[in-house]
Image (cartoon, coloured by chain):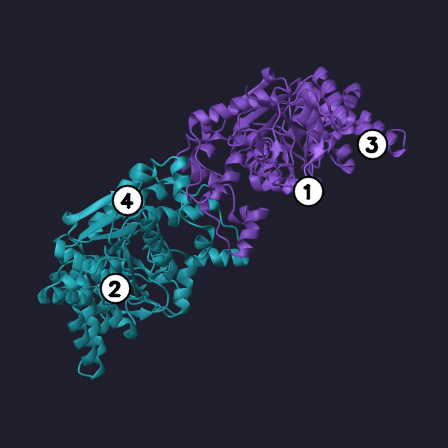
Chain colours: A cyan, B purple
Amino acid sequence: MENFIEKLTREQKEEVKRQMKLYTQGVQEIIPAEELEQKLAKSIINNEPLKIKLGLDPSAPDVHLGHTVVLNKMRQFQENGHKIQLLIGDFTGKIGDPTGKSVARKQLTDEEVKRNAKTYFEQFGKVMDMSKVDLYYNSKWLSKLNFEEVIGLAGKITVARLLERDDFEERIALGKPISLHEFFYPVMQGYDSVMLECDIELGGTDQHFNILMGRHFQEKFGKEKQVALLMPLLEGLDGVEKMSKSKNNYIGIDETPEEMYGKAMSIRDEQMIKYFELVTKFTPEEIAKIKANLEAGELHPKKAKMLLAETIVSMYQDEEAAKKAGKHFASVFQQGAIPTNVAEIEWNGGEIASPIDLIMHANLLSSRSEARRMIDNNGVKINGEKVVHKDEQLVISDGLVIQIGKRKFAKIRVKA
Amino acid sequence: MENFIEKLTREQKEEVKRQMKLYTQGVQEIIPAEELEQKLAKSIINNEPLKIKLGLDPSAPDVHLGHTVVLNKMRQFQENGHKIQLLIGDFTGKIGDPTGKSVARKQLTDEEVKRNAKTYFEQFGKVMDMSKVDLYYNSKWLSKLNFEEVIGLAGKITVARLLERDDFEERIALGKPISLHEFFYPVMQGYDSVMLECDIELGGTDQHFNILMGRHFQEKFGKEKQVALLMPLLEGLDGVEKMSKSKNNYIGIDETPEEMYGKAMSIRDEQMIKYFELVTKFTPEEIAKIKANLEAGELHPKKAKMLLAETIVSMYQDEEAAKKAGKHFASVFQQGAIPTNVAEIEWNGGEIASPIDLIMHANLLSSRSEARRMIDNNGVKINGEKVVHKDEQLVISDGLVIQIGKRKFAKIRVKA
């Protein structure tokens, strides 16, 4: 690669430095950082934006804060004039799993793909300016490849290289079958980068292998290689596992302000700075200051977390909603009061009922066994008092409030 | 599979037995023999011929006796009313090697493929009735597959299964790269069997893995599985290596009667019976008799070999040519005489020349160094007398005969 850095003026060099600092913030790995620097220099000299690719699975459109880690990084590039390429991997979604073994990878119809893409767009709009984003569907080029062209692609990668992917290596070691078609998912992802001619591909560290495929295939097709920019995986509310819907440790960006605020307040103290870095718009300098104040004891962790929670709600709702959610949280959780805007549930189930009956009727938990467990763990209150016996018979009166844990409430309205 | 054998009459059972004995002759492996028996029984009951597939590489149309091993087996099926499916693997030939690494697998044009197929047809016509053969080109279905369909195919086979192929296993062990596209050659061969719905696929033992792919994919596509019928590889004239053009140990079926006969006479004694079994039309009973007579000392090996040589020439030329070639051989090699029909070469190179000049001029050997070696080994005669000195200067006279080894002759005609 040409050395573009040495062609820069002093001001331009400062600009590259500034952007490098910004893009490096919170990043786990840049492969390789020197190339990113060169690309930035080239972009400045030629006055041409860099093309930043993000690949999306069309089957999982529920966006949570874990996803926004890469979205926030995208936004940083966008705010500095670079071009975002959103790639919907609809080809994969449309072909499903030919072995029929994976339920998760079921075939999607064209309509489902489009609908999911639209959902992404609406949600991403809360982080980026979607009017400046280019949207691509990889079925556009992948569905047109014939067998000869597929052979041509396959001729550009070795079996040994593919077997290096962690999960393949592991399955081979355990004697678990890998279906030949699975080799094509990384190949497709690599070929997408050839078609998009992107400069940078963003993803979580779990995309390490697949994103390097882009570099591999771009080189094989005689193109400039993309830089892999890998973001750390955000731990969920449990502080241990990667945030995900299935682990139920997530903050969805479409949740109510109260839910978001409450969940954000349950983030572990030791995760707080990581959240500031990865899911807010705070600059590296501002975050350094918060960190310093926390360490010096000048900022109480609870205050810092309230700032984080308010910031997150502001990003996905607005400031007013964030302030309200903060007040709501303070009244309910800090003072133990019953909130004012509790959902009301009609009741015509008789004058006497067990707490489990009420919980099920109000749809606060999903099963009777779960309700039983919750009572055993002292997690259920009726009118602010702990329920002790699962089978207790309650006299039902209009306005009775059931509370599960800290944040779930329902008010019983007896039908006249 | 249904049990068709038990539905047969006694005569029909005898017929299955007879055919089984015939098809088993000289075979290395039948996978599995029980299924072949069932297929024969089914064919008799339904009065439907079996479909016998032979795949051909379109890039190597020079047929030698090594190839006729499978062709003779084909002919046996054909003579019993079964259907021969010749499959030209033109798709493979047309795509070449996408890595560009293999010179052997260079891309063929449509015309080259057609021309090579025609050459096959002409040559195979010496063994089988080509008017009853069905010809297929696999590009017909393979070139039409799109990426989605390729993924579908790939989803029906595991990486571990493919890595079991001997040469893949070996290369992995040696750390030699396998390009992903190479996995598709056995997959294509298997898919061809799906499309042809063949009952039996014939091939050499070196095709073991690829032919089993046919069984695998037919099953995955819900079809009846083909039986693999694997023929031994024929050793060439050296008695050690597999007969092949590159090893120069072959008898081409398009060679002159004299060449064929002479080469056949150089087959090793211990290979003779194998040749009778694999490349002639002798029945198992006839061959058993020849073998017994040889072992009892009632048939001299030379006589047996003359029968073999004559038989081979008759198959690819005619009886008369075979008889003439036999006489020619007897006169030249057994009596040391100069044959009567020696090729005549015009000479206007002056009155004096070295034996090497003459050999090169008559094109009897391919290089001066080879000619020199041949003289050193006492392998060159001029007018029946051994040449002793490489650099001897000969006086050239009209009608001078040069002889190389036992079978190569040229007569010099001095231009007036």
Q: Give coordinates of residue A265: x percent, y percent.
A: 25, 69
Mark 2: amino acid: Glu
Spatial CA span between label 2 and label 4: 24 Å
Q: Residues within 10 Å of mark 2 (few under 14, many from 20)?
A: few
Q: Chain of mark 2?
A: A
Q: Give coordinates of residue A227: x percent, y percent.
A: 27, 57
Work out which quarter of the rendered image holds the N terminus of chain B and state it: top right
Above-or-below relation of A104 to B312: below
Q: Nearer the viewer, residue A158 or B128?
A: B128
Which residue corresponds to the image point at 23% horizontal and 63% vertical from the top-left?
A: A279
Q: Nearer the viewer, residue B86 or B337?
A: B337
Q: Chain of mark 4?
A: A
Mark 3: amino acid: Pro
Q: Nearer the viewer, residue A107 or B389?
A: B389
Spatial CA span between label 1 and label 4: 65 Å
Marks 2 and 1 in Cβ contact (< 8 Å): no
Above-or-below relation of A280 to A150: below
Q: Nearer the viewer, mark 3 or mark 2?
A: 3
Marks 2 and 4 in Cβ contact (< 8 Å): no
Give the residue pinned by disc 2.
A34
The circle drawn on residue B377 is 1
Spatial CA span between label 3 and label 2: 78 Å
